């Protein structure tokens, strides 16, 4: 299977998360992620952990525990997708549903976990996952301070959409911590290469 690395080198205006409208003429900088095929995602983000989606009460009960990346990726086949934020248009209407609706196909491919990660706190992500009825299919993790995405070079300033520091829209197939496939959308409101249907063809 050929690995796919998408790098952004063109300039385009940022689009609104809500509905794909262009909301400014902010030029798009040349972009290349810090990860590529063969990268050890755990080593690329040392000392970084994620926060599993949960209620506030569960967070208190767990003493606000976090999950080390090695516990997520080591000795496992993982499909992970990142998105700009909970409750935003494309994320709610297309991105999460594409993975939820194809979960049986991922299981047929012996994928151990399908994971959604966003620069949100785990409590917002939990409420959103419940609203989408997706928690039985997808594991949701918060990257509350954006450190995971910054380590991978996948951070994105979406202040023009009133979202502040967030992430690109992306997907990856990771085996035992090693990135096999990485797909990054050109614009945060695009939904072309980060869908479940697309990455299923790459596994």
Image (spheres, rainbow, N blue to C red):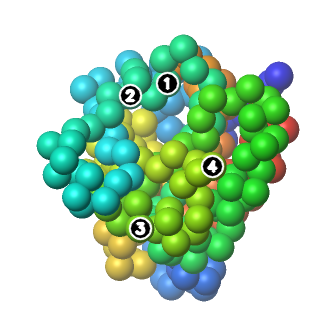
Check contact, mark 2 vs mark 1: CB within 8 A: yes
Q: Earlier in the sequence, mark 1 or mark 3?
A: 1
On screen, 64 above or below 107?
below
Check disc 1 and report the residue beneath it: 73
Q: Is residue 44 visible?
A: yes
On screen, 183 above or below 189?
above
Front residue of 102 and 13: 102
Q: Regarding mark 2 in the picture, which secondary structure is present there? A: helix
- Crowding around mark 4 (Cα neighbors within 10 Å: few <14, some 14 to 19, many 20+) is some
Q: Earlier in the sequence, mark 4 or mark 3?
A: 3
Q: CA distance from mark 2 to mark 1?
A: 6 Å
- Crowding around mark 3 (Cα neighbors within 10 Å: few <14, some 14 to 19, many 20+) is some
For this view, does 32 lie left or right of residue 146? Answer: right
Check contact, mark 2 vs mark 3: CB within 8 A: no
Check disc 2 and report the residue beneath it: 69
Q: CA distance from mark 4 to mark 1?
A: 17 Å
Of the 4 image quadrants, the one containing the N terminus is top right
Check disc 4 and report the residue beneath it: 137
Q: CA distance from mark 4 to mark 3?
A: 15 Å
Q: CA distance from mark 2 to mark 3?
A: 23 Å
Q: Earlier in the sequence, mark 4 or mark 1?
A: 1
The residue sitting at 45% across, 28% down in the picture is: 72
* Image coords of residue 48 (percent x, y): 28, 32
* Image coords of residue 92 (percent x, y): 58, 71
- Crowding around mark 2 (Cα neighbors within 10 Å: few <14, some 14 to 19, many 20+) is some
Front residue of 143 and 60: 60
Check disc 3 and report the residue beneath it: 127
Q: Regarding mark 4 in the picture, which secondary structure is present there? A: loop
For this view, does 193 lie left or right of residue 151? Answer: right
Q: Is residue 166 visible?
A: no
């Amino acid at each position: 299977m050929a690995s796919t690395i998408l790098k952004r080198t063109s300039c385009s205006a940022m689009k609104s998360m809500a509905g794909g409208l262009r909301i400014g003429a902010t030029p798009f900088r040349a972009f290349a992620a810090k990860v590529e095929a063969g990268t050890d995602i755990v080593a690329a983000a040392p000392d970084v952990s994620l926060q599993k989606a949960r209620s506030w009460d569960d967070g208190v009960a767990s003493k606000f525990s976090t999950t080390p990346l090695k516990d997520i990726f080591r000795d496992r086949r993982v499909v992970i997708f990142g998105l700009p934020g909970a409750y935003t248009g494309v994320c709610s209407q297309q991105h999460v549903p594409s993975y939820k609706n194809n979960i049986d196909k991922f299981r047929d491919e012996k994928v151990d976990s399908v994971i959604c990660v966003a620069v949100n706190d785990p409590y917002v992500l939990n409420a959103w996952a419940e609203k989408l009825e997706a928690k039985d299919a997808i594991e949701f993790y918060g990257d509350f301070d954006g450190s995971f995405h910054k380590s991978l070079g996948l951070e994105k300033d979406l202040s023009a959409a009133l979202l502040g520091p967030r992430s690109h829209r992306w997907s990856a197939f990771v085996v035992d911590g090693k990135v096999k496939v990485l797909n990054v959308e050109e614009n945060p409101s695009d939904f072309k290469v980060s869908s479940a249907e697309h990455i299923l063809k790459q596994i």
